[in-house]
Amino acid sequence: MSDAGTALRQDVHALYSDHHGWLRAWLRRRLGCGERAADLAQDTFVRVLSARQAADTSAWREPRAYLTTIARNLMADHWRRAELERAYLDALAAQPEALAPSPEAQLLIMETLLRIDACLAALPALTRRIFLSSQLDGMVYADIAAQQGLSLPTVKRHMSTAFVACLSAA
């Protein structure tokens, strides 16, 4: 391992040793669940390790601010997934039992919904609004352009961006 790799490993170890307990307690206060807090604390450090800029430890000058930013994003992802799952289960419960998909199909549907949600969440807000107006509300591009105060080519560009994102997520 290179000297830079060894130094990074030591920096991550120090960051973990110095702040893991504090982060877990911070998450436990916000989530009200020790197990979920422990999972999200671990996920936070996994995100630190997998970040492209992991080798740039300048973000670690304020380690608690850095870690809480990552942890807040993970909590938002957690709550969004939980809300999506709850909505799906509510919709499923409203179906007649004879039409209910198998547990395997339910799992596949839930995984697909989570991938779609992640794809949409990654889009810029305007692109997401335009895409949802077209796909969920059935609006044509010209009406979306008028509603949003945009040109038709701009709406088409946003739709293209959204479609490419959805296809790459599939």
Image (cartoon, grey):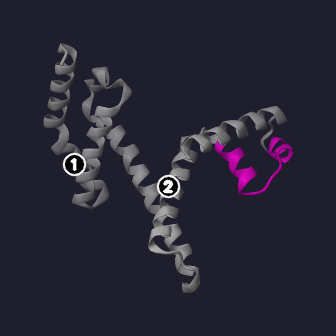
Q: Secondary structure at mark 1?
A: helix
Is any part of residue 66 visible from this angle? no
Where residue 100 appears, as percent x and y from the top left, is: 54, 79
Q: Does 26 appear in magenta?
A: no
Residue 24 tag number? 1
Furthest toward the top, the residue is: 3
| Residue in view at x 45 percent, y 69 percent | 104
97 or 148, which lies in front? 97
Q: Is residue 25 shown to the viewer in this render?
A: yes
| Kind of residue indicated by mark 1 | Arg
Give the residues in magenta. 128-147
Residue in front for this viewpoint, 68 or 158: 158
Residue shown at 68%/46% (left/top)?
Answer: 129
- Residue 142, x across and y down, in percent: 86, 43
* Most frequent secondary structure within the magenta stretch: helix
Within-10-Å neighbours for mark 1: few <14, some 14–19, many 20+: many
In the depicted structure, whether residue 98 falls above or below residue 30: below
Percent x, y of residue 27: 27, 51
Residue shown at the point (14%, 30%) measured from the top left: 14
Categorize mark 2 by other alpha carbons within 10 Å: few (<14), some (14-19), many (20+): some
Q: Nearer the viewer, residue 119 or 58?
A: 119
Residue 83 coordinates in the image, percent (x, y): 47, 62
The answer to whether residue 46 is left or right of residue 124 is left
Which residue position is annotated with label 2? 114
Q: Earlier in the sequence, mark 1 or mark 2?
A: 1
Q: Amino acid at mark 2?
A: Leu
Secondary structure, mark 2, is helix
Residue 140: in magenta span: yes
